Image (cartoon, coloured by chain):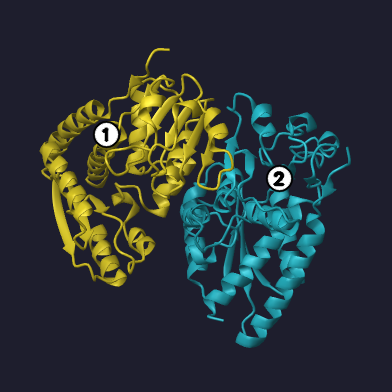
Chain colours: A yellow, B cyan
Amino acid sequence: MSQARLMDGTALARRIVEETAERTADLTARTGTTPCLATVLVGEDPASVTYVRMKQNRCRTAGIASRHVALPADTTTADLVGTLRALSADPAVHGILLQHPMGRHIDERAAFEAIAPEKDVDGVTFASFATMSFGLPGFVSCTPGGIMRLLDAYGVDPAGKRAVVVGRSAILGKPAGMLLLARDATVTYCHSRTADLSAAVREADIVVAAVGRPRLIRGQDLKPGAVVVDAGYNEGNVGDVDFASAVERASLITPVPGGVGPMTIATLLEQTVTAAARQLGA
Amino acid sequence: MSQARLMDGTALARRIVEETAERTADLTARTGTTPCLATVLVGEDPASVTYVRMKQNRCRTAGIASRHVALPADTTTADLVGTLRALSADPAVHGILLQHPMGRHIDERAAFEAIAPEKDVDGVTFASFATMSFGLPGFVSCTPGGIMRLLDAYGVDPAGKRAVVVGRSAILGKPAGMLLLARDATVTYCHSRTADLSAAVREADIVVAAVGRPRLIRGQDLKPGAVVVDAGYNEGNVGDVDFASAVERASLITPVPGGVGPMTIATLLEQTVTAAARQLGA
């Protein structure tokens, strides 16, 4: 059997960032206002610092301004909510990214809900989850949104297909399933309590692995010719899919790294410019 | 093979209404305030008029006050939103039921979102959908919430089971699937674009039919011993399940009528008292 074709997230993300840069330049020229993403970081977790810096750098590449708000690790929920409300009300800020996790003493949900839905370019609010779920206009969670873009770019139409999402987190698994459902896939959510994961995965024309368990899905679990999207990211650049065996059985597969990962930031930038255009009425 | 046991929604709903009446009496005695449900109806659609009257009557049975707001059929979205915001801000109103459908000229979503989440006892807002989906405290959509109560009452634990929800409406299919997922079922959403509905349904330990197509699910589609919840309600008191053949194959099944139907209002009343207790700090 021939090997699966790779879904190249790095290349697609690059194209999206280039398009976003053009939209940004055009919007800035027409309105005199540069789209601005506010990044909010609580504490100094090294991975979070790195992620935020990557997002800021990519903003710069696309011509999007960023405003960084660094809060001390002992920031209270009330203070964080206050900061996010102020950014939500600030007309110079068009999108808000709250880096998470934020530390155990913070009520993350209260923080997310302090982000105005029209600036929720990371797709973390209740309103964004609901609009994704109901197929209404709004912002999508960036990684699930990036997954849908990858499928589109490689000609995978979810309509009528069996899709299995492994994982049910609020910002990855659940919204990924809802976006696939909105595109008319027959969607199954699997998770740690699923009795026979292999049997469920074997039904799938499209598999989205989003659970954070290294190499959980193996080639033998796949229906031959399945489309495999690995949104897992574990230590040592290992995904949730055992790439070596899966590539022999899938028709399309995302590598890790270079698959889903780059799409997340690309979606964030794209949504930031869209948010700015809407807020500027342009 | 023996026939399935019936899940008696009429009897369970009666017990819930009795318990709710006791809680209402206790709350009223302790706070001096009678819990109050506002019912809002746009126009005079006969079915809607009947539904609202049933809900008011059942409120009375449980000792819950109701305040009816009848709006003319040509009410604008802006006026309806204004009415709902006023009820949301009125401390004498603890729960709000907006009867739907409301007519094509109304933006139903804008209307729903004008209901304060803490008074959304019918579970129709974005916030309620998200809290259901994320397993957070909040109000559930009444029919899906009633389905979960029925399963609990008959000792059906969804954890680790395969559940198939047929239908994906915003207030029935989607939230029913999310509630089952929150209770650790492996959940599959099927719908009009599902390629092989029978095959998907046959995987299910628990089937929730919520699509509004008379007798769509037949006995031969079921895994022997499946638990069948028929939330369909079609002309002539016919459900989405072909009862005669399904009862021969299922282990538990809801009749239509007398299954899911009565649970919807019971859940509405129960949530109204809960809302009142929270708002009264009691």
Residue at 60% in and 24% down? B195
Three-letter amino acid code at the position of disc 1: Pro
Describe residue A139's horizontal placement relative to residue B258 as left or right. Answer: left
Residue at 76% in and 61% down? B13
Q: Secondary structure at mark 2?
A: loop
Describe residue B179's horizontal placement relative to residue A282 as left or right. Answer: right
Check the residue under mark 2 and report the chain it is in: B
- Residue B53, by quadrant, is bottom right
- Above or below B185: residue B242: above
- Above or below A168: residue B36: below
Q: Can you see residue A267?
A: yes
Seen from the viewer's position, the closer of residues A122 and A143 is A143
Q: Whole-percent x and y of residue B266?
A: 71, 62
Q: Quickly name the residue at label 2.
A: B231
Label 1 environment density (alpha carbons within 10 Å; few <14, some 14–19, many ≥20):
some
Callouts 1 and 2 in the same chain: no
In the picture as drawn, the residue positioned furthest to the right comes out as B2
Three-letter amino acid code at the position of disc 2: Ala
In the picture, the disc for residue A238 is none
Quadrant where the image shows the C terminus of chain A: top left
- Determine the CA span between mark 1 and mark 2: 44 Å
In the picture, the disc for residue A257 is 1
Label 2 environment density (alpha carbons within 10 Å; few <14, some 14–19, many ≥20):
many
Check the residue under mark 1 and report the chain it is in: A
Residue at 35% in and 44% down? A141
Q: Secondary structure at mark 1?
A: loop
Quadrant where the image shows the N terminus of chain A: top left
Q: Whole-percent x and y of residue B89?
A: 47, 70
